[in-house]
């Protein structure tokens, strides 16, 4: 059972990540040819796709959005193609509501083949594979992989001159390639300052952000541990355990020392849990799961189960035999080991109350993507649990003035249930956006939150109670009154959001504004779709440039636009301070003339504007994933960034502010 719970916590410990821009190559190719008989052969193109990524198939409709797999045959000497492309496995087919089309893709490994007939003893084949791929966080633009093959067939040569002509052609092609190698480096204005590769040495450092995030995680989980103290599973254990140490010890000093060891044992147990989660999966896997729609549905269901448990429908308990075994082990052992097993017994006994709280906190603990997040979170949580045992052991007279166990602890559980229920909708919203169900658009989400927090206010005022906890008590204390007032005030704050109010205080939780049917904030940003044109406009206006590398088939680009760029504060900051250049890396509009560049020792032909903007991102910024944001000055030098997929509005605002400050300086 502990293993099952550990798996659940591992799944929960995955929420958000500051994705750093980097060059991604999720697909590697091996191209070869083989003869099936004397005159017939096959070109074999084997694609190895990294775990978590999928590559779109050649059966995909080009009008659907993502770019399908295509092969352009640049040179066919001594061969004729037979039929079209084939694959050794059927692609996965799934309807995507966001694109309103059937999408097909492969994962793992797939081999695409093309049959041919040799018409000459010696033959040569050259081609370009064009493909695109995505994972749950990023998409790469349509990418080209060139290949060159030669071979021989057992056919009668038409003439000796034909073979010589083929050899001469190959020599000419080699000469042309050599010329391209020498001249292509400057064929796309790479010598111009606007195209010069940027210097990332002064780019945003993640160290300070991680330090700040870890402090935030520690404080959040410490508060969560304090809340867990107030539940009926933990609070009654404090006077019982402290009294046990005071009665058992030969001296007060020894009792206090044992209590400190007991508290340290609690910290060690929860700290090991956090380290175990990180060691098994690692930060990268946790972050990958956090953007998975399936995992977010699991998170939603788990939090709903936790909420229903807090409402009193049932208790989430570990087998009592485990606690009994730990208790008997503590009695049999002596010294430090005995105290450690007592602490472990407390962990098992209090699980029905602390389990849901721990699960929710671990979601937040991994939100920064820092590999130490779960461990730091569990340290803060366990420290809050351990402190009271040590303090009451040092000052036992405080036990007389401590609040007695009673119905107020059930109130804590019910309030936590309402909060768990509200937070669960965030995860369902993520899955809803990913699949395009439109069952939890912004107004539906807000309507549910309004009802939840209004009911919480009514509960705190004693208007109703759950049957498990007995009849409602109309007489309430001062604390419950003020909590009810806060809950009703928050409800009133949410109401204008039904008509499109930005609700900045909860913008990180509610769905983006673009899902709102009625939105009073419908103004659109002015965006340039040409790099050089946008840079000229920025220089004329005296503003820094915000470059948005995006794509028509990039799902996460749409998420960022709705959740971050369309947020009122961010929208106004961009509109007033920047010239926006939005470059679609899968733009299919043809360039006036194809451009040739040498990249990684290979000749690459840029046919479309999408090819050009993708090359700009790779050459200038050493990145190829979208969404990708950078801020430049009028000379094309980096001011802020890069910033990738992260729906954290305060972080994106800091990214913008750094660009504004850098331009002014």
Image (cartoon, grey):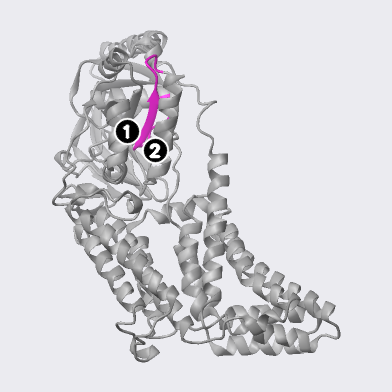
- Say if the magenta span includes residue 378: no
Count of numbered circles in the view: 2
Q: Is residue 627 magenta?
A: yes
**Relative image position of residue 453 (x, y in whole percent):** 31, 68
Mark yes or no: residue 544 visible.
yes
Q: Earlier in the sequence, mark 2 or mark 1?
A: 1
Q: Nearer the viewer, residue 460 or 307?
A: 460
Left or right side of 459 for 275:
right
Is residue 125 something one can see in this rendering?
no
State the image coordinates of residue 149 (x, y, percent, origin top left).
35, 27
**Neighbourhood count class around disc 2 (C-alpha, 10 Å): few under 14, some 14–19, many 20 upward:** some
Horizontal relation, residue 485 to residue 590: left or right: right
The answer to which quarter of the image holds residue 348 is bottom right
Q: In this view of the protein, which residue sits in the foreground, 555 or 96?
A: 555
Residue 594 in picture, x, y percent from top left: 24, 16
The crowd level at tag 1 (other Cα within 10 Å; few <14, some 14-19, many 20+) is some
Q: Is residue 192 above or below residue 47?
A: above
On residue 573, which mark appears? 1
Magenta: predominant secondary structure element? loop
Element marked by disc 2: helix
Q: Which portion, as a residue range, is magenta?
A: 621-636
Q: Which residue is mark 2?
A: 653
The local secondary structure at tag 1 comes to helix
Picture quadrant of residue 146:
top left
Looking at the picture, does residue 65 appear above or below residue 292?
above
Residue 468, how many percent across, how many down? 38, 89
């Amino acid at each position: 059972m502990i293993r099952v719970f550990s798996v659940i916590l591992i799944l929960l410990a995955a929420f958000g990540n500051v994705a750093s821009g980097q060059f991604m190559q999720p697909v590697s190719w091996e191209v070869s040819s083989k003869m099936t008989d004397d005159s017939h052969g096959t070109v074999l193109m084997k694609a190895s796709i990294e775990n978590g990524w999928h590559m779109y198939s050649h059966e995909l409709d080009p009008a659907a959005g993502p770019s399908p797999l295509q092969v352009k045959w640049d040179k066919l000497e001594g061969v004729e193609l037979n039929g079209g492309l084939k694959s050794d496995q059927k692609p996965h087919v799934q309807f995507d509501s966001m694109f309103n089309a059937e999408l097909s893709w492969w994962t793992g490994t797939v081999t695409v083949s093309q049959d041919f007939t040799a018409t000459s003893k010696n033959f040569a084949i050259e081609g370009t594979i064009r493909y695109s791929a995505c994972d749950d966080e990023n998409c790469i633009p349509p990418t080209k992989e060139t290949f060159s093959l030669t071979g021989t067939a057992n056919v009668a040569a038409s003439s000796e001159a034909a073979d010589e002509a083929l050899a001469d052609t190959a020599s000419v092609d080699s000469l042309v390639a050599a010329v391209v190698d020498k001249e292509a480096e400057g064929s796309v204005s790479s010598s111009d300052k606007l195209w010069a590769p940027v210097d990332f040495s002064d780019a945003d450092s993640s160290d300070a952000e991680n330090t700040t995030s870890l402090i935030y995680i520690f404080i959040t989980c410490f508060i969560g541990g304090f809340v867990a103290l107030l539940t009926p599973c933990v609070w009654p254990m404090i006077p019982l355990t402290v009294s046990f140490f005071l009665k058992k010890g030969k001296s007060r000093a020894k009792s206090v020392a044992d209590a400190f060891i007991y508290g340290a044992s609690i910290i060690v147990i929860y700290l090991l849990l956090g380290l175990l989660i990180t060691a098994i999966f690692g930060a990268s896997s946790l972050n990958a799961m956090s953007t998975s729609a399936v995992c977010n549905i699991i998170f939603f269901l788990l939090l709903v189960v936790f909420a229903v448990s807090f409402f009193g429908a049932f208790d989430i308990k570990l087998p009592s035999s485990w606690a009994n075994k730990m208790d008997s082990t503590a009695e049999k052992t002596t010294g430090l080991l005995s105290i450690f097993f007592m602490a472990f017994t407390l962990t098992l006994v209090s699980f029905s109350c602390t389990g849901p709280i721990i699960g929710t906190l671990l979601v937040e603990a991994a939100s920064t993507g820092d590999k130490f997040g779960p461990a730091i979170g569990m340290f803060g949580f366990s420290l809050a649990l351990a402190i009271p045992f040590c303090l009451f052991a040092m000052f036992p007279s405080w036990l007389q003035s401590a609040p007695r166990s009673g119905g107020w602890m059930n109130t804590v559980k019910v309030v936590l249930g309402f909060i768990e229920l509200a937070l669960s909708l965030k995860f369902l919203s993520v899955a809803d956006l990913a699949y395009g169900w439109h069952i939890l658009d912004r107004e539906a989400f807000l309507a549910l939150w309004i009802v939840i927090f209004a009911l919480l206010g009514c509960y705190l005022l004693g208007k109703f109670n759950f049957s498990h906890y007995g009849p409602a008590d109309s007489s309430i204390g001062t604390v419950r009154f003020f909590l009810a007032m806060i809950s009703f005030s928050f409800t009133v704050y949410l109401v204008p959001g039904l008509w499109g109010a930005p609700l900045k205080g909860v913008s990180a939780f509610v769905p983006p504004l673009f899902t709102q049917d009625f939105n009073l904030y419908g103004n659109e940003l002015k965006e340039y779709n040409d790099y050089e044109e946008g840079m000229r406009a920025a220089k004329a206006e005296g503003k820094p440039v915000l470059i948005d590398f995006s794509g028509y088939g990039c799902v996460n680009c749409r998420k960022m636009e709705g959740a971050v760029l369309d947020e009122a504060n961010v929208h106004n900051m961009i509109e007033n301070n920047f010239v926006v250049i939005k470059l679609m890396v899968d733009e299919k509009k043809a360039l006036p003339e194809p451009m040739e560049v040498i990249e990684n020792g290979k000749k690459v032909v840029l046919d479309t504007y999408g090819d050009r903007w993708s090359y700009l991102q790779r050459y200038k910024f050493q990145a190829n994933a979208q969404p990708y944001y950078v801020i430049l000055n009028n000379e094309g030098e980096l001011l802020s960034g890069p910033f990738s997929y992260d729906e954290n509005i305060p972080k994106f605002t800091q990214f913008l502010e750094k660009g504004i400050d850098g331009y002014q300086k």
